[in-house]
Image (cartoon, helix red, strand yellow):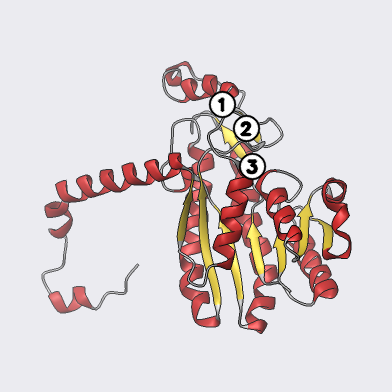
Amino acid sequence: MTTWFITGASRGFGLEIARQALERGDNVVATARRPQDVKDALSQHGDRLLAVALDVTDEAQARAAVDAATARFGTIDILINNAGRGVLGAVEETSDAAMRSVYDTNVFGLANVTRAVLPVMRRQRSGRVLNLSSIGGFESAAGFGVYCSTKFAVEGLSEAMRAELTPLGIQVTIVEPGYFRTDFLDATSLHTEGQVIPDYAETAGTVRRAVPGLNHAQPGDPVKGATAILALADAAEPPLRAQLGSDCVAAMDRKIAQLREETDRWRELAQSTDHDDAEIAAGRPAV
C-alpha cells in the first residue's frame, strides 16, 4: 500500500490530494499547522489517515512528523511539498521581514521537510518527490516578484535533486499550477504589503487592484488539478516539469518563445566571451 506525506494538507491542493489518495485506498500522512482541520475533513478514512502538526519552518517538527509517519506506516513512498504562502507588492515595496517570511515557508520549509523525508526514501531506494511550484516558477510578474523568486528557487533545487536522486531510485517532479480556485489569494495565504509606492501604480499597483476580483474566479479546478497530480505520482516515467492549466501552458509557450528570440538576438555577444584556448574552455565543469 502506498503511503503519502503531504504538507499544507488542511485545504486547497493538499487537502484534495489527501482526499483522493485516501479514497483510492492509500495511506496518507496529512500535515498542517492545525491538524484538527484535516481530521475534521477526512476523519471518515480511519487508520489510513495520520494527521500531524507541522509548521514546515520548524526543522525539528519536520523530523518528528516523519518519525510519526514511519512509526505508523513503516514507509513514505510519495512526498508532496505543497505548503506555501504568497506576498503581493512590488519588489521595492516588500519589506525584509515579509520577504524572509515567504522564503522561510516556500524555500527553507520545503528544504526542511525534504531533508527529513529523503533518508527514508534512500534506505528504500525508491520514492517520489513532487514539489509544488507555480506558473510563477518560470515566468515572474509585477506585484508577485518575491513570491515568484521563491518558486524559481524551488525549481532550481528540484532540478538538482532530480539529478542527485534518480540514480537512487527516487523520482523528482516539479508541478507548475496556473491559477486555480484554491484559497491562495485569500488573506490567510497571501500577504499584501502595506507600503504603496505611487511610481508602481501601473505595474504592481494594477495587480494589487485586480487580485480581489480574481479570488475564486480562477480558471483552474482544484479537484481536476489534484487528480492530475496523482497521475504524475503514478507515472512510470514522470516528467521533470508538469504544467497544470491552460493558462500555465500558454505562459510556458510564451516564455520559451521569448527566451529563443532573445538568445538568438544576443548569441554573437554570448559566444564572443569564450577563452581563446578551446581545450581550457572545453574542460570547464557545467554550471
Residue at image position (53%, 48%) is 150
- C-beta proximity under 8 Å, tags 3 and 1: no
| Nearer-N-terminus badge (3/1) | 3
Q: Does residue 130 show up?
A: yes
Q: Which numbered circle lies on residue 85?
A: 3
| Nearer-N-terminus badge (3/2) | 3
Disc 1 target residue: 214
Kind of residue at disc 3: Arg
Instruction: Identify whether 35 is placed above or below 48.
Output: above
Disc 2 target residue: 185
- Residue 285's spot in the image, x, y percent? 31, 74
Kind of residue at disc 1: Leu
Instruction: Identify whether 139 is placed above or below 201.
Output: below
How would you rate the neighbour count of disc 2 (Cα within 10 Å): few for under 14, some for 14-19, many for 20 or more? many
- Residue 109's spot in the image, x, y percent? 66, 55
Mark 3: secondary structure: loop
Mark 1: secondary structure: helix
45 to the left or right of 273: right
Between tags 3 and 2, which lies in front? 2
Residue at image position (38%, 41%) is 250
Kind of residue at disc 2: Leu
Tell me how many marks there are.
Answer: 3
Mark 2: secondary structure: loop
Between tags 3 and 1, which lies in front? 1
120 to the left or right of 264: right
272 to the left or right of 263: left
- C-beta proximity under 8 Å, tags 1 and 2: yes
Spatial distance from mark 1 to mark 2, Cα to Cα? 8 Å
Q: Work out whether residue 151 or residue 216 is closer to the camera in this orientation and state it.
A: 216
Spatial distance from mark 3 to mark 1, Cα to Cα? 17 Å
